[in-house]
Amino acid sequence: MVVHTPAEIAAHRACGQSVGLVPTMGALHDGHLSLIRRAAAETDLVVVSVFVNPTQFNDPSDLERYPRTLEHDTELAASTGAALVYAPAVETIYPPGFATNVHVADLTDPWEGESRPGHFDGVATVVSILLNQIRPNWSYFGEKDFQQLAMIRRMHRDLALPGAIVPSPTVREPDGLAMSSRNVRLDADDRAAAPTLYEALAAMREAAVAGERSALKLAILGAVMVKRAQQFELEYLQVVDPMTLEPVEAVVPGARAIVAATIGGVRLIDNLALLDDESEQ
């Protein structure tokens, strides 16, 4: 069922029911559906928000081109376990006179923040609004947008927002490419080369598990692999602390390799933990 206001969500929430929120901008793919399935297994009432957030787009033309497939998204969400699809009007999220902006310092400045100024402020603002409107017990986010996840976790803690943030592993195509709504824009040749990003990260992880602890050496290993696929224009490839996102010199459990590169005019990002938290040193 599609609802458009917080009051409608409250009306469907029975006393004592736990609520799971899966925030999206629509154009649902298997990555989103995996979050919905997990939420359905862990909560009583699953709400999927579908809101194309205008404040997180740097280019107005990107906002205009973003796919809007609410009817199809609703069918997918319902078939996967969602009870409600929350599709608010822009005015429901940003009423006339809205003047507040949420900025999470430090975490949003490097990496994606350099190429997409203001993007994370838009994400932080809309997520804080959704959490306050829906008041879920658990909110589910994929690890694919790792910097975004780190920012949301920090904001959630700092602002004492309701519920808990639940991170979920990146969902991948059979060849390793991280699922993204952008993947459909790749032509056949670029799509064939796109898994190189994951292959580079996986090679870095394999080397780390085998004992390599130099973040610089691992980053060089990954960068060489990406650059061999000549279609790619590498923007960054770095090993960072999972909480601060600052570069590290030595790999420790939880350290993340993060990468961004453009291929055929399509910008792709990915990340991978190089050592699991329980890995022995």
Image: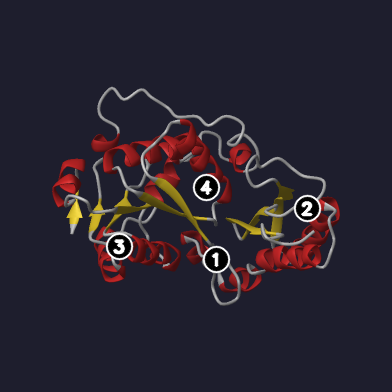
Residue, disc 3: 73
**75 or 229, which is in the foreground?**
75
Q: Between marks 3 and 2, how big is the CA–CA gap?
A: 40 Å
Q: Earlier in the sequence, mark 3 or mark 1?
A: 3
Residue, disc 2: 251
Q: Earlier in the sequence, mark 1 or mark 2?
A: 1
Label 3 CA crowd tier, 10 Å (few <14, some 14–19, many 20+): some
Label 2's element?
A: loop
Q: Between marks 4 and 3, how big is the CA–CA gap?
A: 23 Å
**Which amino acid, by three-letter code, is at mark 1?**
Leu
Residue, disc 4: 149
What residue appears at the point 32 percent right and 55 percent down from the top-left corner?
Answer: 68
Residue, disc 1: 186
User: Which tag is nearer the camera, tag 4 or tag 3?
Assistant: 4
Q: Quadrant of residue 122?
A: top left
Q: Is residue 135 left or right of residue 150?
A: left
Q: Between marks 4 and 1, how big is the CA–CA gap?
A: 25 Å
Label 4 CA crowd tier, 10 Å (few <14, some 14–19, many 20+): many
Q: Residue furthest left?
A: 11
Q: How many marks?
A: 4
**Which amino acid, by three-letter code, is at mark 2?**
Val
Q: Between marks 1 and 2, how big is the CA–CA gap?
A: 33 Å
Measuring from the top left, give residue 133's x and y in whole percent. 27, 39
